[in-house]
Amino acid sequence: KVLILDFGSQVTQLIARRVRDASVYCEIHPNDVSDDFIKTFAPKAIILSGSHASTYEDHELRAPQAVWDAGVPVLGICYGMQTMAVQLGGKVEWSDHREFGYAEVRAHGHTQLLDGIQDFQTDEKHGMLKVWMSHGDKVTVLPPGFKLMASTPSCPIAGMADEARRLYAVQFHPEVTHTLQGEAMLRRFVRDIAGCKGDWQMGSYIDEAVAKIREQVGDEEVILGLSGGVDSSVAAALIHRAIGDQLTCVFVDHGLLRLNEGRMVMDMFAGRLHAKVVHVDASEQFLGKLAGVSDPERKRKIIGAEFVEVFQAEAKKLKGSSTTAGSGGGAKWLAQGTIYPDVVESGGTKTKKATTIKSHHNVGGLPETLGLKLLEPLRELFKDEVRALGVALGLPEDMVYRHPFPGPGLGVRILGEIKKDYADLLRRADAIFIEELRNTIDPATGKSWYSLTSQAFAVFLPVKSVGVMGDGRTYDYVVALRAVQTSDFMTADWAELPYSLLKRTSGRIINEVRGINRVTYDVSSKPPATIEWE
Ligand code: XMP
């Protein structure tokens, strides 16, 4: 296994991600672990992360001596390179302007790390790499034993290596995707230079994660808010695998869920996994609070606040009950399905919207008021890894590959005031649309239109229009269908669904859902429209 020492860079997790992409197990630990820790960990290789700090000012921020004594390959990235230089007798110079962004790096000599890895070639000797840089200080004198590995015009020592000791360092960031060959470099380092086998898979991740949860939690009890979404479902399945009945899931039905959602969640978790699930039907309470409210932001706030209230009341009950399984005497832990993208702060990756999303998803503020410790076993995983983990844990693919569903649920898909009747109509129309998307296969790709779209749903419009059915005139409501394709949900295109699919969906909704006599398709992209209508 590989040890990643974190000096506080925002992208340290990405190093782990790339190492895992090479099927090698790794763990991230703080840079100031003890020498003994490193000896016991017995890494096959060590990677030193970047940092916002400066080796010039932060004299304490160094790698433990054991890193250099371990005799294993070491890769320093950015700050990791600078601390390597300083600790091994080179020199780093302080600079007051930062180099930030895209750069072209020239490779020097033949090092095992970069040999044959390049984006293009300028002359016979030199390969060029397109990389991403972000640094202020730079190495100006190589430590004894090192040779130059890479350079840019503004950073003459952008890479260095002491191949006899298998020490490598780069000033740029191979872990970010903007460094096109970054994945190849990290793979070269862990697989070829360090000789890691590359036999790590999700299955082994489960074993490690299970062991870690058991160690963290001991015999104490855990509660988790289960929403039916991918993240909380996978977290629940993983924690249940680890501690069984010490976990209690709380599933709050706010009356704004999709059709059969409650039943599906209960069947899966209580029925198939035999997990303890408390199903709280709070729909009347929620709908009561929402009566007469039509402003979207107020609706969101009410739903969010009410959710916290209901969950908190349930959690208190569970906390008080020491008669349930385990010997912990009531819950001590609150588990959440926080995933890595939720953790990354600033750096342009987190918008105001994302903050809102988080507060809905993650029951903000709860752990403090309840005096609970936080258990977040998915914190290091990306969405696709969470999905792979879910499948490896035996969750059905249908559940794991579901489109995202907003915390306020149908509350933001019923325009204006929310009424139970509206929600009932919308649920049925939405279910028909989703069913048709799942059943319609695109001949070009062999995939269903459900998997070809990122998010799709129906929206209830509280306006009435005239229609004709049989011999009679109808005067009923309208639904809009929305389907988008996007990679990050920040921008999105409306999906060019086949007309035949739209036709079938519209025909079925109007025939099967009495009360709706008109269906429209939303052809607005984001921006300027948003994905949801509210
Ligand atoms: P918009 O409508 O802003 O949505 O284009 C982008 C993504 O965020 C989801 N979304 C929410 N999720 N609480 C959530 O948990 C919310 O209040 C919320 N509003 C929007 C939306 O479904 C889409 O995936």
Image (cartoon, grey):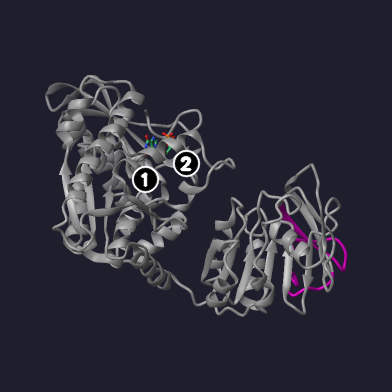
Q: Quadrant of residue 33?
A: bottom right
Residue 441 shows in this picture: no
Q: Residue at x 70, y 52 (%)?
A: 58
Q: Is residue 472 left or right of residue 184?
A: left
Membership of 125 in magenta stretch: yes
Numbered label attached to residue 269: none
Q: Main secondary structure of the magenta part?
A: loop
For the image, the number of numbered tags is 2
| Range drawn in magenta | 109-132
Q: Residue at x 66, y 60 (%)?
A: 174
Tell me the quarter of the image containing the C terminus: top left
Going from the N terminus, do you reach mark 1 or mark 2 first? 1
In x, y percent, where is residue 344?
A: 52, 47
Residue annotated with mark 2: 489
Q: Is residue 68 left or right of residue 225?
A: right
Comparing 469 with 186, the one in front is 186
Residue annotated with mark 1: 404
In x, y percent, where is residue 268?
A: 21, 58
Q: Residue at x 50, y 46 (%)?
A: 487
